Amino acid sequence: MPLLAIETTCDETAAAVVTRSREVLASVVASQEQLHARWRGVVPEIASRAHVERIIPVVDEAIRRSGVARSDIEAVAVAVRPGLVGSLLVGLTAAKAIAAVLRVPIVGYDHIAAHLYACRLAHGESLPYPFVGLVASGGHTSLFHVRSPLDLERLGGTIDDAAGEAFDKAASLLGLPYPGGPEIERIAREGNPRAHRLPRPLVADRDRLDLSFSGLKTALRYLVRPPGAPADTPHPVGQARADLAASFQQAVVDCILAKLELAIDRTGCRAIAIGGGVAANACLREAVEAFGRRRSLGVFVPPLSLCTDNAAMGAIAWERLERGEDDGLRLDVTPGTDRSRRPR
């Protein structure tokens, strides 16, 4: 009998039906990209209102596609941390209502841990524990020592902007549409990643596993619009824009890779798993895989459909359900970021 999983941590309304054997019977995601494009970033109030409008149709469609009856659903899982409080509450309220009507257990799961569990869905039992996990997305860029699906130790992460947020801001500086990550990657294919000497913040610091992208973003801004330049300075175009995009993307990847290598050295792990929306970036994926080959490490990357926010990765809830856990209707959300949090 299957599990219904719900995901509303940020701006995707998602639901999935997953069996105890981790087979994804259906996964439905309603994106809000067009709603937030005007502001080149997620507006929390708009996001939560959109979730209210979409959550029931998305859940209904996931159940319809799965081919199972509502009465066959064995449990409900919902992402309860971290994330935007308004968005999280919409998913939690829907999950509680469904669990109450069906009289089945309800469990909350950690969105960050679930991103790494997407590698378990993709690679099955071949994913070895422990491993170093990287979650890179619009709101998170963190490294973890993952001892089991529910035992993650945060090793370090961004002290300011997340990698995905930095890509969005860089795209805005270059006159590219939102979301910025895919646009930067597209334009960068035609550029020279060594055309500009952009900084690699904290890369030389071997004492900590933290990252920083704020200064890198500022450096790009000064290349696009030098101090004292008019506010209406036109965006770069053509080869100039491609070179800036490629140089920025390479700098982000270099920063992440340096800290990933340091995490491997510190933990002694022989495997790497990555997740999150930025894990869909081909430059990052290729760099991590090349690093894995150099060090004879196992590298586990989910398919693109499991990188961006989705509810299929809510299959991690089976790890708790199989231990007999049930949060009940008193389950609550924990908004915010993943910093200093130990996912369960």
Image (spheres, rainbow, N blue to C red):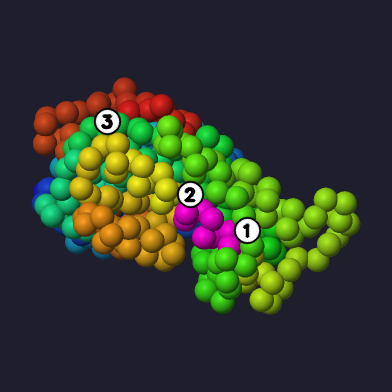
Left or right: 259 in relation to 184? left
135 magenta-colored: no
The front one of 30 and 135 is 135
Q: Do the residues under discs 1 and 2 have CB atoms within 8 angstroms? A: no
Residue drawn where x is 21% and y is 57% of the image: 296
Kind of residue indicated by mark 1: Arg
Nearer the viewer's eye, disc 3 or disc 1? 1
The answer, for residue 38, to whether it is visible in the render is no
Residue 98 on image: x %, y %: 29, 39
Kind of residue indicated by mark 2: Cys
The answer, for residue 190, to whether it is visible in the render is yes
Q: Which residue is mark 3?
A: 344
Q: Which residue is mark 2?
A: 255
Q: Which residues are magenta?
A: 245-254
Q: Which numbered dot is residue 197? A: 1
Kind of residue indicated by mark 3: Arg
Left or right: 267 in relation to 181? left
- Sequence-earlier tag: 3 or 1: 1
SS for callout 3: loop
CA gap between label 1 and label 2 equals 14 Å
Residue 33 on image: x %, y %: 54, 58
Q: Quadrant of the C terminus?
A: top left
Nearer the viewer's eye, disc 1 or disc 2? 1
CA gap between label 3 and label 2 equals 28 Å
- Sequence-earlier tag: 1 or 2: 1
Nearer the viewer's eye, disc 3 or disc 2? 2
Q: State how many labels appear.
A: 3
Residue 12 on image: x %, y %: 45, 51
Q: Which numbered dot is residue 343? A: none
